[in-house]
Amino acid sequence: MLSAALLLSLAPVQDAPRGAPPARPHAHTHISGQPEDPQSPILLDLTYTGEVMSNVSGGVRRGARYLDNLDIVLEADLGALAGWRGAQLHVYGLYNNGASIAELAGDAQAVSNLETGTRALRLYEAWIDQTIMPGLSLRAGLYDLNSEFDALEASSLFVGSAHGIGTDFSQTGQNGPSIFPSTSLAARIGAKPAKGWAVRAAILDGVPGDPARPGRTTIHLSRGDGALLVGGVEAPLLGARLLLGHWRYTAAFDTLDGGRDHGNAGLYLRGEAPLLDREGKQIAAFFRLGTANGDINMFDRFASAGIKLTGWVPGRAEDELGVAFATAFTSRQYRLSTPATGSETAIEATYRTRVAPWLTLQPSVQYIRNPSADPSIEDAWLLGLRSEISFRLLG
């Protein structure tokens, strides 16, 4: 099945069918923009991820889907290659087959962070990061804001999209914010004033890509699209890591009661902390809280939390397992406009194991309570098995 999907990735790109689900957040491990091997000025990594996921009970209907994701990432030290001191180049190509498990589960938060709803081979990121002075850099180009904003290491284990970026944030915009699978032109400035501290701010095109052609990488700057402004602070606290962020669109949006409003904005607070690190065994916990404008968006509050254990399986020092939940709360205005319940909750248990230097396997089980906060959809149970094949071709 994996080889068939790889061959499929070479087929021509097709536009998304009508009614395809909106853009979903991506929760893969993100590339930092700095080559891992200081002796190698250029790196080329290829990662193929395939996932079989089945809705075994409840939801819209039972069934299974095969979702996939191909990452091709090139990183280059432009100082070593071309004498451009302090500059790093990052180019990221992406392919997805467009299969949807959400159409079976009926959920709103996306049980798989591989889901796009559109079969496409696209340029996902292309930026240059310029060091201005030690601890201060400027990054510009096609940019996934979730690579640096609203992202934690502990929560990246989970396959549910809500643990990559909060649902309060990912639901927003005309084509989502600049996250997986559609990114926009952006400029980000970042500073690291002290150990463990980071301050970042970014301005991004308010409409990533072209909503009418979701399978294409498009840069179209329009005054009507407005901009997305994002700021964040990362701080250490008693061994923990805390993130505080604020985001705001400058454009006006339709409100749920038929009006127009410029206040499409929100806040998030998230953190992770090591609870135990002894004799090769680790336990880490994480949480996230977030808000959004309930007059514009379906969900106005969000909460998630979880725990990750590493090295607890005998003889498997790198294996990870975890349990987490994510709850998105419907806004009062949304409940007035539709017969919705108060929230949707996703609970996930997963286990990730490396069976070869180039292959990892990850089974998961998820329970979705009140899918899409729609009282007509039964609670859903889903089973999944993810495989990831990774190769470094250069570097």
Image (cartoon, rainbow, N blue to C red):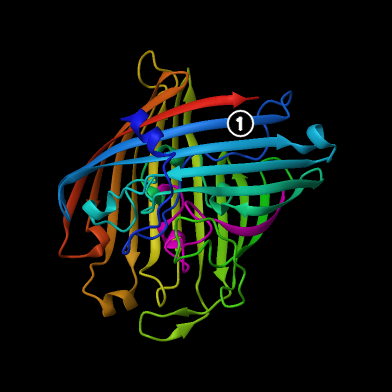
353 to 239, vertically: above or below: above
Q: Position of residue 66 (x, y in %)?
A: 29, 40
Q: Which residue is mark 1?
A: 44
- Is 185 magenta? The answer is yes
Q: Amino acid at mark 1?
A: Leu
Give the SS element for disc 1. strand
Q: Position of residue 84 (x, y in %)?
A: 83, 41
Asked whether residue 192 appears in the rendered view, the answer is no
11 to 297, vertically: above or below: above
- Is 265 magenta? The answer is no
- Residue drawn at the location 37% of the way across and 58% of the way down: 16
Instruction: Using residue 257 as the reference point, say whether residue 221 is left or right of it.
Output: right
Q: Nearer the viewer, residue 281 or 249?
A: 249
Outermost residue toward the front in this view: 12
Q: Position of residue 333 (x, y in %)?
A: 33, 78
- Highlighted magenta segment, given as a residue range: 163-192
Q: Nearer the viewer, residue 386 or 342?
A: 386
Q: Position of residue 73 (x, y in %)?
A: 58, 37
